[in-house]
Amino acid sequence: MATPALTTDQAAIRSQLERLLESHGFRTSKRYPNLLRHLVERTLEGRTAELKERTLGVEVFGRPADYDTNADPVVRVSAGEIRKRIAQYYHEPGRETELRIDLPLGSYVPEFHTPVDKPAIAIAPLPVIVPPKRRSYLLLVPVVLCALAGLWWRPWVRPSAFEQFWRPVLNPANAVLLCVARSPGGTDVPADDRPRNVAWADVTAAVRLAGMLEASRQPYQLRLDVGATLADLRQAPAIMIGAFNDVWTLRMTSELRFTFQRDGKLCWIRDRQNPSSREWMVDLGNIDARGRPVVKRDYAVISRIMQALTGKVAITVAGIWGHGTEVAGEFVTDRSLMASLARHAPPNWEGKNIQIVLATEIIDGQPGPPRVVSTHFW
């Protein structure tokens, strides 16, 4: 149960905060521990009215008082990363009995949850049944009918967006092909000449997807994009990770509404319904002193389509740059993020082809939470 920061709880809360900040997800960063510590301390002091985005940007991140929170979403992105790291911490075995510090979605005021022991299950004695008089049987008929109706006519529960998205793919009888592209550093190099190494962002997406498949008890085979043949894709559903560096992604999505386009170092997602727009574009020619592209915002496309070429369902998880691929992998494997898909979907969308365009803000080289910017169902 969430509790206010009572004086008697403050020592325990601060002790748990230090334990949390010493975990791997926080000790490797400066930004996220500073913000979480600030939020917890202000809450313990009863100053929650000060926990607003602009105020936090000024006090924690040193932004000017009049800075544009839309152009510089450092607080929102950092809060999203804190939520993710907190979830990872408490997901580890043995954390169930620890005091829990949470940062609810849509708020910068942390909540503190005390561990609750599981109540003992009381076993009630069987009731003594007294045989009713003959006339009483008639009175029992409505009661029995209502009880049977409650057992047989249960309300229909609609599957979650996560379940509806993945249902065409998950089938224990067939091993899904999980296809990972080679290094995106080869966008200017012919496919056959690229080295057989995989970018870290693509590895991250692949690990998330593999974990989801294992949790769903779904067999899968892991391949490099060059190791997958058309014959393989005709045998079972496939998941393609990567865009410009994955030959199968480009081939399978080339005729769809949202496609990946490139002109030199300029890369963008093209919308066939608005072909002149380059709203979703990344300039990979803007590089830092180490020769690495400086990307402040990245985009991705998730596609789930029934391929005429193979007769099987294919899913592509692809970003313009690595950050986009990483958040696309996060989106399709996170039930809470997938829940937002239902708000954009038409009725009976689960049986349709789907494309989802995502955007993510990049702060200090780290992608923020993915957000849906466009969808298409057909």
Image: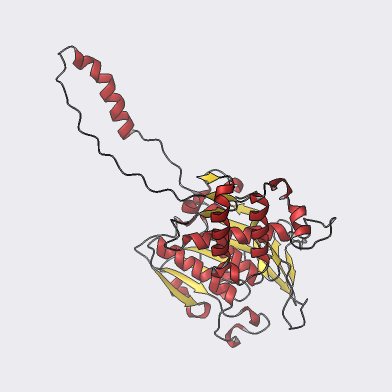
Left or right, 230 with reference to 27: left
For image coordinates 17% across by 24% down, the residue present is 129
Q: Residue furthest top?
A: 135
Residue 276 picture quarter: bottom right
For image coordinates 28% across by 24% down, the residue present is 145
Residue 378 in the image: above or below residue 223: above
Residue 67 picture quarter: bottom right
Relative image position of residue 60 (x, y in whole percent): 74, 61
Residue 121 picture quarter: top left
Number of disc labels: 0
Residue 277 in the image: above or below residue 194: above
For image coordinates 63% across by 78% down, the residue present is 184
Relative image position of residue 201 (x, y in whole percent): 59, 73
For image coordinates 61% across by 72% down, the residue present is 28
| Residue 369 appears anywhere in the view | no
In front of the other: 245 or 43? 43
Relative image position of residue 321 (x, y in whole percent): 66, 71
Residue 51 in the image: above or below residue 229: above
Q: Residue furthest front?
A: 8
Left or right, 92 with reference to 375: left
Colour approach in the figure: secondary structure
Relative image position of residue 320 (x, y in whole percent): 66, 69
In front of the other: 152 or 47? 47
Residue 318 in the image: above or below residue 228: above
In front of the other: 28 or 338? 28
| Residue 329 appears anywhere in the view | yes
